Image (cartoon, rainbow, N blue to C red):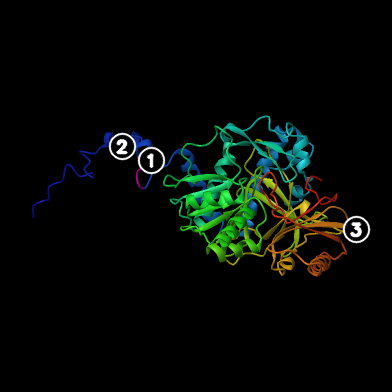
Amino acid sequence: MAKRAKNRHHPSSKKSFGKRGKAEVAKAPVQIGPLLHHWPSLPLPKTAQAMSIFSQMHFIEKMPRHQQKRLQLRQIERVLRHAYETVPWHRDRLAGIEQIPGGDLDEAFFSAIPIMTRSDIQTNSTALQSTRVPPEHGGIGYSRSSGSTGKPIEITITGLKQLMSRALTLRSHYWHHIDISRKNIDIRTAYKPGTEPKNSTWSSLPWSGPCHRLDLNLPISELFEQFIAEDPAYVQSHPYTLLLLAETSRKTGVLPRNLIAAMSFGEALSPKTRQTLREVWNIPVIDCYSANEIGIMSHQCPDNETQHVQVENVRIEILDDNGTPCKPGAIGKVVVTTLNNFATPLIRYEIGDYAEVGKPCSCGRTLPVLNRILGRHRNLCVLKNGERFFPEIRENLEKFRQIRQFQAHQTTLEDIDLRIVATQSFSEEERGEVQAVLQKKLHYPFNVNIIEVDDIPRAANGKFEEFKSDIPGAEIDR
């Protein structure tokens, strides 16, 4: 039988595709620019880096917990050595780290590091900055947080910290099946004049849809009109702002036509807000726990309403008043260590929040669980005997149907001002009932001063607190 003729033009032909041909193909770079709008797209370097980190997260979130801890301690050791060598304020706190063999950091050494507070950052901002940030971590910028008390803190951040935020955001979008090609409305403080982005999108992926920002400090009626006119698929803001918008929808009968989900951040998300958005808009709320000086700390589980700690970005400890780690079901102080910001490393930083520790999640992810984020130091009720606790009074006050909104403000160890937005005025008998309910729930016969108001303003940073206290020991800046 005659042999079949060899195809000279087939890629397997050695004669037509020899060493030279292979070398030419290997050296020819793919042009990113022309392929930005190709499908699938070839992303820009910063997006490709975020996607690379995100792809690793699929494996990390299912690793055995002991393996996550081992890898996290290895990264923490890098942070500690860098801080010891280049951050003046941390040097004394980390004495002894130079004696630990590489890769052998243990929990005992880490747990003995003193706690740092918000006041430490405020008074030592320069001494907390690294004198030698690794150049491979990218450019250096600044992050400023006003805080609930209005006392700002400012830290330096790196491009790597921003990159991690993009990757962690991709994880949340993936978990919750967010369609990023649709429009998103971001409600927070307005851009400063001249700083508005020309073409704002809400994801680093090339096919991201538009993101428009609305000013949360607008009167709620005006903000609601703009929100409805934008007709978004997604909206993100503080929980209280979302609650006011949904209640305005219920009052006016005007509903957003294409809304798929709401994303909340910046303050504790109450069960009432979740319930109201389900009832009025028929959408879920996806919560994120974050802080300007830290970045993203936890994302809501896609299978339930608990929070998964983002172990690639932070180490979170929940500690009781004695500094002992809390067990599942217990509430304690949130202490955070950042793993990626080498410009201003925050090591065992008591951020000012309280949270409840959760059990391992049934979703199959091995990331640590927080059942709920409760609030700030300044949200604690303080009794004369020194006892402090979170006053979960919403459920009790909601029994009074005319209460639309409220805010309790402990002004002394004996007195609480209760501001109420009511659909109808309270009779003297009803006022007595409200006072009795509050006294019973707070375990003390407080003098409850009921003040009926038309509106309860948010703080300057847009956040809202249902309970706040002026008593020393309850404030955030201790």
Going 53% across and 36% down the picture, which residue do you hit?
Answer: 196
Residue with the mark numbered 2? 25
Looking at the picture, which amino acid does disc 3 mark?
A: Lys
Q: Position of residue 9 (x, y in %)?
A: 18, 42
* For residue 44, side relative to residue 130 (left or right): left
Instruction: Give the foreground label among 3 and 2.
Output: 3
Question: According to the image, label 3 marks what residue?
Answer: 384
Label 2: state its secondary structure.
helix
Q: Nearer the viewer, mark 3 or mark 1?
A: 3
Sequence-earlier tag: 3 or 2: 2
Q: In this figure, which residue is indicated by the disc labeled 1? A: 36
Q: Is residue 151 left or right of residue 16?
A: right
In this rendering, the label closer to the viewer, 1 or 2: 1
Mark before the other along the chain sequence, 3 or 1:
1
Circle 2 residues within 10 Å: few <14, some 14–19, many ≥20: few
Dot 1: element: loop
Q: Amino acid at mark 2?
A: Val
What span is in magenta?
A: 35-39
Compute the Cα span from label 1 to label 2.
21 Å
